[in-house]
Image (cartoon, rainbow, N blue to C red):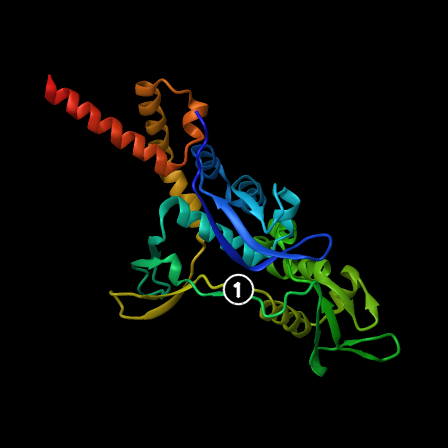
Amino acid sequence: MTEFRPHITFLLPGGYRDPQGVLHREVELVSLSGREEELLADCESSTRATFLTILMTRCVRRIGIVSPVSSDMVRSLLIADRYYLVLKLREATFGAQVQATVQCPWEACGEKVDIDFSLHDIPVRESAEKGLLYTRELSPEAALSGAQGEQYREVVFRLPNGEDQEAIAPVVEKNEAQALALLLTRCIRRLGPLHDPGPAVIQRLSPLARAEIARHMEEAAPQVDLTLAAHCPECEREFAVPFDLLWFFLGECKTSRELLYREVHYLAYHYHWSEQEIMALPREKRRKYIALLAEELRRVSHAV
């Protein structure tokens, strides 16, 4: 059986910069096969960043003119670009409409609230600058004092990418402040006259300085805004929901895993295809064959 997987093309809000410094933004992405659906269903939350790299390496066919796409390329993508790939992959697999349930955050309420939205409505902001490094200035209050009493205010940094995401993932759940310090250590290229300042210098930064640098990074980076507005019909309060699309996508695949296995069994039983051949099919094509089979079986039963 020849593999056929529908593909979509779109532009990344940031983009991949190759070793020659050329920026590539157009992506060709194929929909999930049954094998990737199974992989997603088996993913643990503690390894999501690493798993996202594996998944996108399998599903991204090219970035710009660069093909094939290696895991190192996927790791080098900005975090917003990686989230945008998840958004487009979810759309290609299950469609753009999302129906989910969240909990009202007000302690006196805590009721479950249904949310229904389209992935097309999620705000996506391109990065205005698309350079390798960014130079910003800290406020006087956030400046780092040098050995001779100098005030180091100028900071040069790169934007966080997938490799950083993987590196700080084991730390984030245990200590967010430590995770931010690790991220800044990896991303800051110069602080005043100090090149690649390292963890010792980062530890000397005040909480205000760290917050300012993190804000400068966020403002410079492309954004996929997954904060949704919700309304609780029970307490009538409005609240914002930070929606974890990757977690939700994983949950959808876990929920539909049993159905996936039933589809494989159904097609193997009637067509005598191997599991490998059926699992290589995308979800939409499996469903088309199942619909054709169901119609044929009904026609035969009525004829008898």
Residue closer to the observer: 22 or 168: 22
Q: Quadrant of the C terminus?
A: top left
Indicate the position of residue 88 as horizontal and vertical percent values: 45, 51
The residue that disc 1 covers is 223
Above or below for 162 versus 300:
below
Q: Residue 208 is drawn in which quadrant?
A: bottom right
Above or below for 245 versus 258:
below
- Pointer 1 local density, CA inside 10 Å: few below 14, some 14–19, many at least 20: many
* Residue shown at 52% from the left, 47% from the top: 28
Indicate the position of residue 186 as horizontal and vertical percent values: 71, 58
SS of the residue at dot 1? strand
Residue closer to the observer: 28 or 264: 28
Above or below for 219 versus 41:
below
Residue 195 appears left or right of 68: right
Q: How many dots with numbers?
A: 1
Residue closer to the observer: 179 or 166: 166
Indicate the position of residue 39 as horizontal and vertical percent values: 48, 35
Q: Quadrant of the N terminus?
A: top left
Indicate the position of residue 48 as horizontal and vertical percent values: 54, 45
The residue furthest right is 148
Q: Amino acid at mark 1?
A: Gln
Can residue 246 be seen from the camera position used here? no
The residue furthest front is 65
* Residue shown at 58% from the left, 67% from the top: 127
Residue 2 appears left or right of 108: right
Q: Residue 17 is drawn in which quadrant?
A: bottom right
Can residue 228 be seen from the camera position used here? yes
Q: Residue 15 is drawn in which quadrant?
A: bottom right
